[in-house]
C-alpha cells in the first residue's frame, strides 16, 4: 500500500481534529506527507438590475476575510505538537460539496484519506457530518480510514479484517497486510454469521486456508462468530480480541445498486457504538 500522500479533510471540529491526529500517526510511521483540505462556500451578494431581475456576485471582500480566518486556523493547527517533524500541506477548496474534495486533488497526491465520522456544521464552514463520510467511502478512488468521535488514540497492534468470503478478497487483503506491516500489527480474519447470512464453518475454513496459502508470511488467524447483526458481531469480536482497527472491503456501489444492496462498510462507519477507526478498501472492477 502506497502511503506517500495522506489527505485529511478538516472542518476544525473536534472530530476532524481527532482524525487528523490519527492521520499524523500514519504519516509519521509511513514517512508520508499530510495534506489538510478544507472546503468552504464563497459568500455571494445579490444585485438588482435595471430590468428588475436579481443577479448574484461573489463578495470578494468577504471571501478574502473568510480565507484569512481559515488560514489562521490552519496555522494554529500546524503548530500542534503532534504535527511537528511532519511534512504538512494545506489546500482550500471553494464551492464544492464537502465529500467531493478529493476530486480537486491531483491523483498522484492521493494515496489515503483519513476522515472524521461526526464533523460539525457551524460558522467554520460546512462540515463533514453524517452521510458525507459514507459518500466518501462509497466514491473515493483510494482507501479511506474513518475515525469516529468516540475514538481514543491507541497503538495499532491488532487489525480485524471482516469479510464474508463472498468475493475474492486477496487483492484487498494484500493492502491490509502492507498497512499492518508498517505498525507491526497482527491480522485477524473475522466472519460474522447471522440468521439471514449464514455460512458453514467448513466454507470459512476452506476460504481462510486459501488466503493463508497466498500470504504465508502474514500469520493470519480466523474467527467465525455468530451474532444477530453483522455490525454488532464485528464489534463483539473487536472487544473479545482487543482489536485496534477494523478493515473491510467495499464495492463502492452507487445509484440503484447501492439502494438495493447497501453497504455494511458504510453502515459500520455511521454506527455510533463502534469507537475504532474503520479502513475501507474498494474492490476494483476488472
Image (cartoon, rainbow, N blue to C red):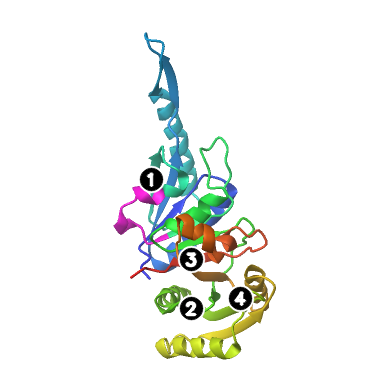
* In the foreground, 20 or 230: 230
Label 2 residue SS:
loop
CA distance separating discs 2 and 1:
32 Å
Instruction: Give the mark, 3 or 1, whose residue is nearer the N terminus.
Output: 1
- Residue under numbered circle 4: 197
Residue 13 among magenta residues = no
Label drawn at residue 280: 3
Residue 80 locus on image (x, y percent): 50, 51
Residue 148 locus on image (x, y percent): 59, 58
Residue 101 locus on image (x, y percent): 41, 48
Depth-wise, is mark 2 or mark 1 nearer the camera? Answer: 1
- Residue under numbered circle 1: 91
Instruction: Give the mark, 3 or 2, whose residue is nearer the N terminus.
Output: 2
Q: Which residues are magenta?
A: 101-112
Residue 186 locus on image (x, y percent): 52, 80
Label 4 Cα neighbours within 10 Å, binned few <14 / some 14-19 / many ≥20: few
Task: Specify whether residue 249 is in view.
Answer: yes
Label 1 residue SS:
strand
Residue 106 among magenta residues = yes
- Most extreme residue toward the top is 50
Instruction: Give the mark, 2 or 4, whose residue is nearer the N terminus.
Output: 2
- Residue under numbered circle 2: 184
CA distance separating discs 3 and 2:
20 Å
CA distance separating discs 4 and 3:
21 Å
- Most extreme residue toward the right is 228
Label 3 residue SS:
strand
Amino acid at each position: 500500500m502506497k502511503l506517500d500522500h495522506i489527505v485529511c479533510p478538516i472542518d476544525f471540529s473536534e472530530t476532524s481534529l481527532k482524525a487528523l491526529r490519527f492521520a499524523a500517526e500514519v504519516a509519521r510511521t509511513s514517512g508520508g506527507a499530510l495534506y489538510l483540505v478544507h472546503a468552504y462556500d464563497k459568500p455571494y451578494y445579490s444585485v438588482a438590475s435595471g430590468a428588475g431581475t436579481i443577479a448574484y456576485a461573489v463578495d470578494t471582500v468577504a471571501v478574502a476575510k473568510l480565507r484569512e480566518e481559515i488560514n489562521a486556523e490552519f496555522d494554529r493547527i500546524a503548530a500542534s505538537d503532534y504535527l511537528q517533524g511532519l511534512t504538512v500541506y494545506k489546500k482550500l477548496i471553494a464551492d464544492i460539496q464537502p465529500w467531493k474534495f478529493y476530486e480537486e486533488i491531483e491523483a498522484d497526491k492521493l494515496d489515503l484519506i483519513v476522515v472524521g465520522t461526526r464533523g460539525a456544521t457551524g460558522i467554520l464552514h460546512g462540515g463533514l457530518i453524517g452521510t458525507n463520510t459514507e459518500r466518501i467511502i462509497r466514491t473515493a478512488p483510494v482507501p479511506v480510514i474513518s475515525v469516529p468521535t468516540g475514538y481514543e488514540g491507541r497503538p495499532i497492534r491488532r487489525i480485524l479484517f471482516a469479510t464474508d468470503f463472498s468475493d475474492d478478497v486477496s487483492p484487498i487483503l494484500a493492502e491490509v497486510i502492507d498497512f499492518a506491516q508498517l505498525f507491526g500489527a497482527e491480522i485477524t480474519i473475522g466472519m460474522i454469521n447471522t440468521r439471514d447470512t449464514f455460512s458453514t464453518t467448513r466454507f470459512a475454513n476452506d476460504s481462510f486456508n486459501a488466503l493463508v496459502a497466498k500470504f504465508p508470511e502474514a500469520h493470519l488467524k480466523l474467527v467465525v462468530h455468530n451474532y444477530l447483526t453483522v455490525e454488532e458481531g464485528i464489534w463483539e469480536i473487536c472487544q473479545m480480541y482487543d482489536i485496534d482497527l477494523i478493515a473491510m472491503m467495499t464495492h463502492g456501489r452507487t445509484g440503484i445498486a447501492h439502494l438495493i444492496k447497501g453497504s455494511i462498510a458504510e453502515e459500520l462507519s455511521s454506527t455510533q457504538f463502534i469507537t475504532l477507526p474503520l479502513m475501507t478498501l474498494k474492490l476494483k472492477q476488472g
